[in-house]
Each structure stands twice: as C-alpha cells, then as structure tokens.
Image (spheres, rainbow, N blue to C red):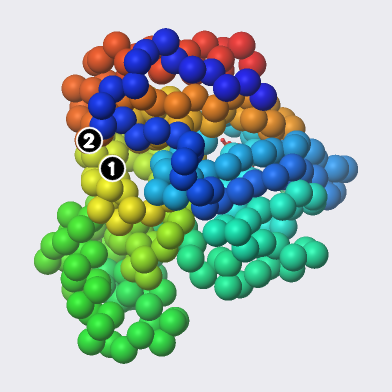
Amino acid sequence: MTISEPDVAVRPGAVPATEGRPAQLEVTGVDKVYQARRGEVHALSNVDLSIGRGEFISLVGRSGCGKTTLLRILAGLLAPSSGTVTADGESTWRGGKRNDEAFAQFGLVFQDANLFPWYTIADNIALPLKLRGVARRARRARAAELCELVGLPGFENAYPRELSGGMRQRAAIARALSYDPKILLMDEPFGALDALTRDRMNLELQTIHAQAGATVVFVTHSINEAVFLADRVVLLTPRPGRIRSITPVPVARPRSLETETTTEFQTVVRRLRHELDEE
Ligand SMILES: Nc1ncnc2c1ncn2[C@@H]1O[C@H](COP(=O)(O)OP(=O)(O)OP(=O)(O)O)[C@@H](O)[C@H]1O
Ligand SMILES: [Mg+2]
C-alpha cells in the first residue's frame, strides 16, 4: 500500500486525515473469498483501513474490484473470511456472528432507493424508528425535520411514485439518517442520476454530512464525485481488491462546483485517474 500525498499545501479549513482523531471504523487484515458454483472468488485481500470519526471516505476502483463487498462487510450484511472490523472499538463480527449492538449505529444507502411504494415518504423515512419502537408522534416530527434537511419539505405525504429518482434517493438518505447513525455507508447512491441532479445531490450530501456529523464511506465510479466529497479517497486494485493508495483531499470546505476548477482539486483528480489507468 502506498500513501500518496498530492503536491499541494493544506489550505486553512481543510479537514485533516485521521491524525489525532480516534478511529471510528477499523478494518484489519480483511479477506473475503466467495464460494461460488464455478469455484472460489477471491474478492478482497488483506484490507487495512482506519477511518476517523466524522471523516468522509470515498472508495473507488474498477468494476468487480470488491467495493460493494467491502461495504457489505462494513454494513454487517456479509461476514469477512478473515480479519476484523471494529466500530467504536467494538468488534462487529465475532466468530462469524454479527454483533447487532455494534451495527445499530449504521445507516445504509444503496444504488436503488428501495422505498416501500405503499408507504408515504414520511412513513418510509420513519420506518427504522418504527422498528425501534419510537411513538408515532415523534416519528412524524423526525420525518418532517429530515424532509427539510434533504430538501424535500412538504413531501411527507407523497408516495414514492410521485417523486423523481433524485428525490427518492434523498428520501433514502433521510431514512438512513432517521436514527442518527454514527456511520453512513453509501454504495453508488447517485449512479442512476443525470449529471446536474448528481451535482446537486453532492452539494446536499456535503451539507448533510457537515450537519449530521456522521462518518461516511461512499462508493462511486466517478473520480470527480469521489474527490469532491471526500477527506480521503481509497483506491482498490482489481480483484482481489487490495488498498492501492489512500489519497488525502486537501481542499477547503464547504466546497462548491467552482472548487472543481481549482488546481488543488484537479491535481488530486489527475493523480487518481493516472493510478486507475495503471491498473
Ligand atoms: N455473492 C457472490 N458470490 C460469488 N462471487 C461474488 C459474489 N458477490 C460478488 N462476487 C464477486 O466478487 C468480486 C467483487 O464484487 P463486488 O460486487 O464487490 O465488486 P464492485 O467493486 O462493487 O464492482 P462494481 O463497481 O461493478 O459494483 C467480483 O468478481 C464478483 O463477481
Ligand atoms: Mg459494486
């Protein structure tokens, strides 16, 4: 693994990497081998990653390199073949068994919004609260607050079919935020959106991250998007996925669309594109 430092000075306001901050998510020596019908698939090899509290990590790499696998392991949907994952110092997997307490603090957003079509937006957003036994009144109040936060005010009583793709993704983000997760895991949440909507979603996600203060791991195929959002960009090698590099993004926040035209931003993007091309 190499740590590449972009040739740019850290500007005031830039978020430093993990130094001085306790790790919130610690991945140590994680390997994943799938037992598929056509034989074993070695998806991840010896992944070590330490993610700080409130840090925004983008995860990039070629198709099939193991990004979703790593996210699913972090999310507790999949057990690693070996290695450990800890959240706030708690092991998330113990002897192949999921530690549900550790996972209670995770929020997940996938490529499809996966809203229940027969529930209103407010009921979809508040579903995790319902499952946790929160009273109806408190659920409605929280749903209204979250609709505001993700830019869907007044849509509480609408149904998913009445919303655009971008709006549905925002509702999915609101649902993931409903129970104040400390860690937000997102797998190409904006992959299906047009470029303009995606830009807007990136700006909104940046605001949400700043306000909610959650630690985020964000998988994307877009290097621009990865750099725009991240404190650090983690690049995986082709299968089996190993960490090829971890690149800090020393660009001040809040970032705007103009940020993408700055030398600092473009230096990081160029470096990552170059590394991806070398794969
Ligand atoms: N359930 C499974 N059984 C067997 N092999 C799997 C399974 N899930 C994923 N794989 C394999 O593991 C490798 C990594 O898959 P993964 O979905 O993690 O890649 P990815 O980086 O998310 O790709 P993409 O960018 O296309 O989403 C691939 O070769 C894939 O075929
Ligand atoms: Mg994937």
| Residue under numbered circle 2 | 254
Q: Residue at x 35, y 34 (%)?
A: 15
Work out which residue is located at the far left of the displayed protein and give it: 154
Q: What amino acid is labelled 1 in the image?
A: Gln
Q: Residue at x 34, y 21 (%)?
A: 10
Q: Nearer the viewer, residue 193 or 82?
A: 82
- Whether 139 is drawn above or below 109: the answer is below
Q: Nearer the viewer, mark 1 or mark 2?
A: 2
Give the mark, 1 or 2, whose residue is nearer the N terminus: 1
On screen, residue 34 versus residue 148, left or right, reads: right
Measuring from the top left, give residue 27's x and y in whole percent: 64, 46
Measuring from the top left, give residue 234's x and y in whole percent: 54, 31
On screen, residue 94 versus residue 269, left or right, reads: right
- Whether 268 is drawn above or below 165: the answer is above
Q: Residue at x 74, y 65 (%)?
A: 94
On screen, residue 190 versus residue 152, left or right, reads: right
Residue 260, by quadrant, is top left
Badge 2 crowding class, 10 Å Cα cut-off, few under 14, some 14 to 19, many 20 or more, is few
Badge 1 crowding class, 10 Å Cα cut-off, few under 14, some 14 to 19, many 20 or more, is many
Is the CB atom of the residue marked by disc 1 within 8 angstroms of ligand 2's nearest atom?
A: no
**Label 1, label 2: how many angstroms apart (C-alpha)?**
8 Å
Q: Nearer the viewer, residue 216 or 225?
A: 216
Mark 2 and mark 1 in contact (Cβ < 8 Å)? Answer: yes
Measuring from the top left, give residue 28's x and y in whole percent: 70, 45
The N terminus sits in image quarter: top right
Label 2 secondary element = loop
Label 1 secondary element = helix
Q: Specify the quarter for ligand 1.
A: top right
| Residue under numbered circle 1 | 206
Q: What amino acid is labelled 2 in the image?
A: Pro
The C terminus sits in image quarter: top right
